Image (spheres, grey):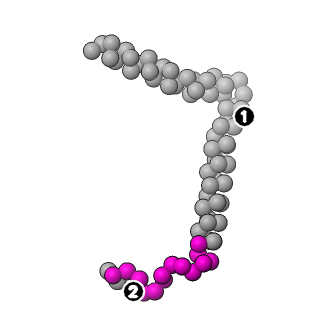
């Protein structure tokens, strides 16, 4: 049973290598360490803009039934 928990510990030692690297990088260069965060923010913003443009394009086609009785529960 002890080997099982040691294996889990070894697994997480390997999985946390990128986070340890970022923690060490932050001590040397704060801007480089936060570049990863800014990259994810930019990707999220680009996805949001794409999603909004797709919603606008769908809304412009008027395919959606917007009548009051569109659903049976109304």
Compared with residue 68, is residue 57 higher up or lower down, i.e. above or below? above
Q: Where does residue 22 sit, x and y in percent of width and height?
A: 62, 27
Camera-near label (1 vs 2) is: 2
Compared with residue 40, is residue 58 higher up or lower down, i.e. above or below? below
Compared with residue 48, is residue 64 higher up or lower down, i.e. above or below? below
Q: Which mark is residue 69?
A: 2
Q: CA distance from mark 1 to mark 2?
A: 55 Å
Q: Residue at x 37, y 15 (%)?
A: 6
- Predominant SS of the magenta segment: loop
Question: From where the camera sits, is residue 30 visible?
Answer: yes
Residue underneath mark 1: 31
Question: From where the camera sits, is residue 23 visible?
Answer: no
Q: Where does residue 33 sit, x and y in percent of width and height?
A: 67, 32
Q: Residue at x 65, y 37 (%)?
A: 36
Q: Which secondary structure lies at badge 1? A: helix
In the image, the segment drawn in magenta is 58-72
Task: Residue lying at the far top in this picture: please name it.
Answer: 3
């Amino acid at each position: 049973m002890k080997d099982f928990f040691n294996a889990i510990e070894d697994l997480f030692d390997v999985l946390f290598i990128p986070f340890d690297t970022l923690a060490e990088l932050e001590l040397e260069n704060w801007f480089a360490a936060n570049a990863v965060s800014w990259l994810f923010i930019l990707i999220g913003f680009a996805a949001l803009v794409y999603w909004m443009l797709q919603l606008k394009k769908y809304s412009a086609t008027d395919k959606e039934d917007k009548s009051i009785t569109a659903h049976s529960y109304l």
